[in-house]
Image: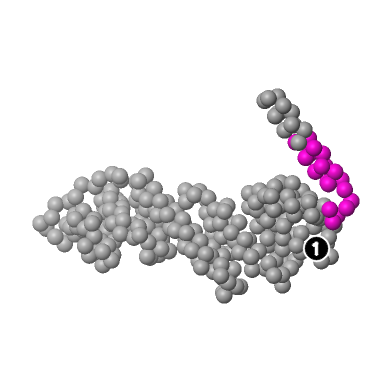
Amino acid sequence: MKYIVCLLYSILLISSCSKYQRLVKSTDMDAKYKAAVAYYEKKDYYHALQLFEELITIFRGTSRAEQSYYYYAFCTYNVDDYAMAAYQFNNFISSYPNSKYAEEMQFMYAYCFYKDSPGSSLDQTNTLDAIEKFQLFTNKFPKSDRVPEANKLIDELRLKLEVKAFDNARLYYRTENYKAAIYAFENFLKDFPGSEYKEEALFLSVKSAYIYAANSVESKKEERFKTTIDQYYKLIDSFPQSRYLREAEKFYDSSRKALGMDKTTSIVKPEPAK
């Protein structure tokens, strides 16, 4: 019984391949187009792609060119070739700027960059490109029903950039490169002032500044302890009841002691990054 089933499956497979090969070699473009659409509707994008690839050249300059290109662009997307799909969606927009599909294609152009946006630990070039393309879409089609989704995806992409920037700054801190950490946290807070990581970033700025100052040569200590105090004030101004307040106050008091501003406070021994 298993042998018969396998045999029947093999016959059907050979027959299907044979039928497809005849389509590929056929000069009947109407039949080829109908078959390509049928493959597409059955989600057999691989076979549809190969047929539409020929058809978009054959139909160029005719009434079927636009529709064939529409299918072709989506075939490239549906086989997960997002870089090629982005190119095809953008080329469709350039070729048919007044098409009824123009809005959809503009959105999909941006969406391909979104799909190719990697995790926050990797290079974020595609993330930046996706944000730019979605903003272009919302500017071009401000009344589109897709605008809320585009804005939602922009927020998601920006969060990825935010996490990337915070992790980079924290990495400097954890590897005890405190000077770089101070600048990195400063840039992070400038770029993402409303971040959920703001409180932690401000505290780590205080701690990085203090450890950097405490381990500096004597001629640099005064300036760097003053920086620690400045960072402390930034923390308490934004988070008066910060969960890091007690530890931050130790660095503040110790910095004042080092500057001769408070004679009663003992110097805090710097701890390595955690």
> As displayed, is residue 50 above or below residue 256?
above
Residue 258 at x, y percent in the picture: 19, 56
**Residue 166: horizontal and vertical position, in percent?**
40, 54
**At numbered mark 1, what does the secondary structure look like: helix, strand or loop?**
loop
Type of colouring:
one colour
Where is residue 189 drawn, in percent x and y? 38, 62
Whether residue 166 sits left or right of residue 221 in the image: it is: right
Q: Residue at x 63, y 61 (%)?
A: 109
Q: Is residue 53 visible?
A: no
- Left or right for 19, reference 217: right
Name the one closer to the observer, 16 or 74: 16
Residue 118 visible in the snapshot: yes
* Magenta stretch: dominant secondary structure: helix
Q: Residue at x 28, y 50 (%)?
A: 211
* Quadrant of the frame with the C terminus: top left
The answer to which quarter of the image holds residue 140 is: bottom right
Q: Is 212 on the left-hand or right-hand side of 17?
A: left
Check residue 151 for magenta coloring: no
Q: Nearer the viewer, residue 184 or 2?
A: 2
Query: Quick check: is 25 in the magenta stretch?
Result: yes
User: Is residue 91 shown above or below 168?
Assistant: below
Give the residue drawn at x 83%, y 62%. Answer: 60
Q: Residue at the far right: name it.
A: 27
Q: Which residue is mark 1?
A: 64
Residue 98, horizontal then vertical, whole percent: 72, 72
Q: What residue do we see at 83% from left, 46% from top?
A: 24
Furthest-left residue in this view: 264
Above or below, 78 relative to 11: below
Give the extent of the magenta segment: 13-31
Label 1 neighbour load within 10 Å: few <14, some 14-19, many 20+ = some
Viewer-nearest residue: 240 or 251 = 240
From this viewpoint, which residue is outermost toward the bottom? 143
